[in-house]
Amino acid sequence: MKRPLISSILAVICTSVMASPSHAQSDALAGAWHTKTGDIEQTAVFVDGLVSHSTFDVKNKKFIATRGGTYTHNNGQLAITWEWDTEKAAAKIPLDTWLGTTTTFKANVGNTLSTDLSGTNAEWRRLDSNDNPLAGVWYMTGRGADAKIASDHAPGDRRTYKILSGSRFQWVAINIKTGEFFGTGGGNFTFENGKYTENIEFFSRNSDRVGASLKFDGKLVDGHWHHSGLNSSGEPLYEVWSKAR
């Protein structure tokens, strides 16, 4: 009598494990994606429940736009609740028509991502799957080697995000309450043996920085990212970043 009971329990356990989706299965979009038409490139980074969609032209050193916010992805539908949109902010579109509102796009993931995120349906290729210890959404919690790190991990309305996937980085300075945009830059990065290198592909404040590589020392200490070196103006910096989500 015991064997059938044990077999039944094992069957239930196995069924439950198989039915429970892994993190990768629950977020098939996680990571960075890329599409290109002529010289115009677009990237979309999905990490820690946040998406950033950026459009730029590396060849001509031109930043075009970035927008993003929180997202969900279910049954081939991508829903984004907007926290920033540089085109709408520049055009002074009324905030109540876009900030905090949700837009739904098609998003089918296979060997490629098929989505109308850019306005027309296109195929995007995967760049990475957030396979990097720095992958995440970060915000600054301290400056200087002796900085006291904020304990509440709650950024205010005006914030600077540092968004990293497995290979892409972007910083974006915004106000999620007023819709203001203060600047952004991004490209690809590497993080090896305590050395963090950014290769800039777009920069809203200074297009001359496109093509530059910036090298920093980087380390993770108790879950906080310590980042030091020289900034894009050649000035020394020491920053501490913490996970925002």
Image (spheres, rainbow, N blue to C red):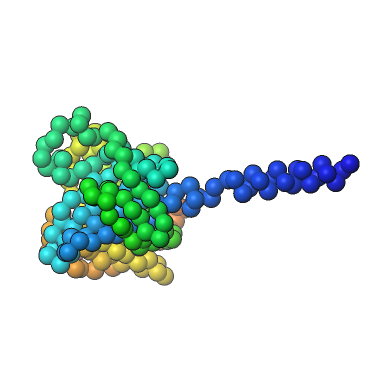
Instruction: Examine the image and state in which quarter residue 76 appears.
Output: top left
Question: In the image shown, does 173 or 17 lie closer to the viewer?
Answer: 17
Q: In this view, does 133 lie above or below 25?
A: below
Residue 15 image point, x, y percent: 66, 46
Residue 223 image point, x, y percent: 45, 52
The N terminus sits in image quarter: top right
Residue found at x 31% / y 67%: 197
For the view shown, which residue lies furthest in the right direction?
1
Residue 219 image point, x, y percent: 40, 61
Relative to 15, 1 lies left or right: right
Question: In the image shown, does 79 or 139 lie closer to the viewer?
Answer: 79
Question: In the image shown, does 9 or 228 lie closer to the viewer?
Answer: 9
How many numbered circles are shown?
Answer: 0
Q: Can residue 162 be seen in this view?
A: no
Residue found at x 18% / y 50%: 65
Residue 225 image point, x, y percent: 38, 55
Residue found at x 37% / y 42%: 77
Instruction: Examine the image and state in which quarter residue 100 appears.
Output: top left
Question: In the image shown, does 188 or 110 lie closer to the viewer?
Answer: 110
Q: Can residue 93 be seen in this view?
A: yes
The C terminus sits in image quarter: top left
Q: Is residue 177 above or below residue 132?
A: above
Residue found at x 35% / y 55%: 113
For the view shown, which residue lies furthest in the front direction?
121
